[in-house]
Amino acid sequence: MKAVTRRSALALGLCSLTSPPLFANETGAAKKRQLPMSTIFKGESRFKTIVAKAQEENWRALPIGDRIIQFARELHGLPYENFTLEIDDHIESPSVNLEGLDCWTFFEQSLGMARMVAIDKDQYTPEDLLRQIELTRYRGGVCGGNYLERIHYLAEWFFENDARGTCRHITKDFAGAERIHDRRIQEMTVLWKHYRYLKNNPELRAPMKTWEDYIAAMPVYHIPKSKVAATEPKLQNGDVIGIATKHDGGFCSHVGLIVRTNDGVARFMHASRNYRKVVIDKSISGYLNAFNSHAGMIVGRPLEVVETVTDPAVYKANLERLIS
């Protein structure tokens, strides 16, 4: 597969504030479509219990990274459930599932709750958390109901959320960071039968390929796993860690959070397919070295809510700068 150049990506409109046309006859913004709350939010009683604890103990006063880990620890031990984002056959929507987590929803919901309680309110609702999920999960922070609006590849998530001031993409700040070259991005279109929306809407597969080409052209850097141990002292609670893979399909194969335990070790906390639950694992270097397929890590550092970019023009300029 030949990756598009930056010039051709811009010509396709891929750096614009909205997705490329989702269907051949669509020229305007996607009409917003919604799913019932019973479909998009699961685990409301757990949500209320966690939030009540956060308010009683004033987690809002903690730095964002420590706050994320407070919420992440409340999800410790919850069962692993794959494909938790595939909730409908046609309509895309922000969603929360606090009954079963995959690696993406574990870090995302920990971050979402930490951001949510930073906004001073007497009472928090499922809608408050869903808004935070929408902000970080979708391009431009907006979901109108279409599957292609979602950020499907983790490497793109780091660029998008840096551009919107929710998570600083800091991989290149570490010594030894290297760019990943000539990576074929194709998991979604090759394995489309595993994704409900792509299986039931074949017209989405061609535009998904366009997005994959766009992502393949991004300047994605990683810290090779041989150099990760030296970076561990600089990692902080709540850092988002993308596990860079050696294989084609995507840039990353997994994601989790850094939690620094009482022994001072920067450990990898994640929803683990192997353990079938959310776990606090080995040091991040130890975790990477345990799997031959892991190439290294990508690092994002979440930002406080007050740093969120709200001006679309600033977001667009930030994104174009980051992917150039």
Image (tube, rainbow, N blue to C red):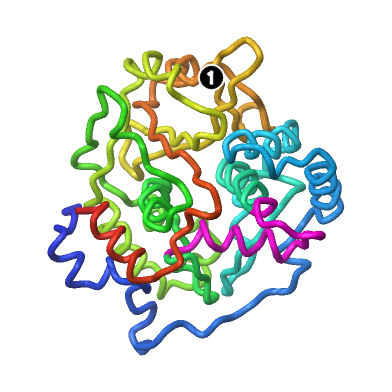
Q: Residue furthest top?
A: 263
Q: Nearer the viewer, residue 263 or 221?
A: 263
Crowd rating for badge 1 (residues with CA inside 10 Å; few <14, some 14–19, many 20+): many
Residue ID for mark 1: 266
Left or right side of 53 for 234: left
Please name the residue shown 72% across and 40% down the image: 59
Left or right side of 293 for 197: right
Q: Position of residue 20 (x, y in %)?
A: 32, 74
Please name the residue shown 25% across and 60% down the image: 320
Q: Position of residue 261 (x, y in %)?
A: 63, 18
Please name the residue shown 50% across and 73% down the image: 146
State whether residue 138 is above or below residue 105: below
Please name the residue shown 55% across and 53% down the image: 305
Q: Quadrant of residue 259?
A: top right
Q: Nearer the viewer, residue 76 or 306?
A: 306
Residue extent of the magenta highlight: 116-139
Q: Is residue 132 magenta?
A: yes
State whether residue 47 is above or below residue 9: above
Q: Position of residue 90 (x, y in %)?
A: 57, 74
Which secondary structure lies at badge 1?
strand
Amino acid type, residue under disc 1 in the picture: Ala
Left or right side of 65 for 78: right
State whether residue 114 is above or below residue 260: below
